[in-house]
Amino acid sequence: MTSVAFTLLFVFFLAAMVAVRCWLALRHMRHVRSHREDVPAQFAHRISLAAHQKAADYTVAKTRFGLVTLAESTIVLLGFTLFGGLQWLSETVLRATGPGMAHQLGLLAAFAVVSGLIGLPSDYYAHFVLEERFGFNKMTLPVFFADMAKSALLGAVIGLPLAWVVLTLMAQAGDWWWLYAWAVWSAFQLAMLVLYPTVIAPLFNKFSPLDDEDLRARIDALMHRVGFAAKGLFVMDGSKRSAHGNAYFTGFGKAKRIVFFDTLLSSLAPVEVEAVLAHELGHFKLKHVIKRMALAFGLSLGLLWLLGYLKAQPWFYAGLGVDPAIGMGDNATALLLFMLALPVFAFLFSPLMSISSRKHEFEADAFAAQHSDAQALASALVKMYEDNASTLTPDPLHSAFYDSHPPAAVRVGRLLSHA
């Protein structure tokens, strides 16, 4: 392949991605607006018109903002690639560090800093304008910037050593470096499953043991019925940042934890909390977690192999705005170019991941209906749709393309069929 051909291919896929995303977003907004004035009959006895209209307005506002961030990210992507931004950044760092590993790690750090600064206004708007307008933001500016500082520090403490290992393998491990790098990456991912709930997550949120004895007894009975053992039951201070609610389990092996947002516990009855947790446990018992991990490991292996091929091709660099004489001697540049270009070519595969995820959600719902109260889960979902201002009337095509969870009407309808 020539560099010109690869540039044209990149531009074609980028234009297709932008066009499809814009088309789907416009369809979604039009469909939600057209159903704004009437609550679907299936939910009319539970959801008020005012709540339904709030969800419609929130969905439209988020989707419209998504178009703004799409334009921003497209301009940034072109700036880093075809307009030569990544090469300029590499040369700037090189003048400060000289060649070698310091330059490569410096380039990764500089790219992260520049990307973070570019995205800062959008992050601020999302929290303090969009979420604030609809009553969801509970985050203060000190918490916002503290989270940013902690994330940056974690990126340096964890990310840079990992990057050093991968870059060293790319330079010194020969043609099979990608296999060794995959082994390192996989080990890192497994380690994070253990470390995240116990070490990293507490840096951002407070986790307190669940002290509601009646609810704890109900949950213990559920876990005994399904054969699930957890390290503990915790309540997270999600209200510190947002009014949205959720529940999840995290960790691996003996480090498994069940976590409830405090906002969720304040809005659901105990039987509904039990049903929501039964759904989450369904993902574990049906091996959805293992399947997703296996898929992620398989994809990462294939992608690292692909990177191993591309980093030796001059057209890969020249086609994305980097002088091959610079790029082929700089593994950090190859890694960044690959990370920038990959989402463009992978975008059209998104529906396949969504289909798989929705299938797992239906299966977990069926599991919950078998081991708890299906009507309670349906009731909890309706409350969560209302509390989170999730639209009950998404555009079907937009939902099929993006949504990891089934549409509300389909999901609740199927659940009630199990009751």
Image (cartoon, helix red, strand yellow):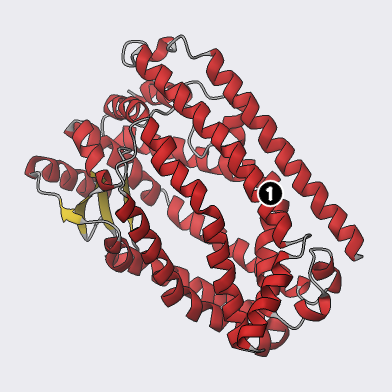
In the rendered image, residue 297, in percent from the top left (x then y), is placed at: 55, 64
In the rendered image, residue 140, in percent from the top left (x then y), is placed at: 30, 48
Tag 1 secondary structure: helix
**Between 213 and 116, the one nearer to me in the picture:** 116
Q: Residue 82: name its quadrant.
A: bottom right
Q: Give the residue drawn at x 19%, y 30%.
A: 269
Quadrant where the C terminus is found in the figure:
top left
Q: Indicate left or right for 72 with 193 as reference.
A: right
78 to 225, vertically: above or below: below
Q: Residue 58: name its quadrant.
A: top left
373 to 337, vertically: above or below: above
Q: Indicate left or right for 70 with 16 as reference.
A: left
Q: Indicate left or right for 25 with 383 as reference.
A: right
Q: Give the residue drawn at x 36%, y 25%.
A: 418
In the rendered image, residue 374, in percent from the top left (x then y), is placed at: 31, 28
Q: Give the residue drawn at x 28%, y 37%.
A: 371
Query: Which residue corresponds to mark 1?
Result: 74
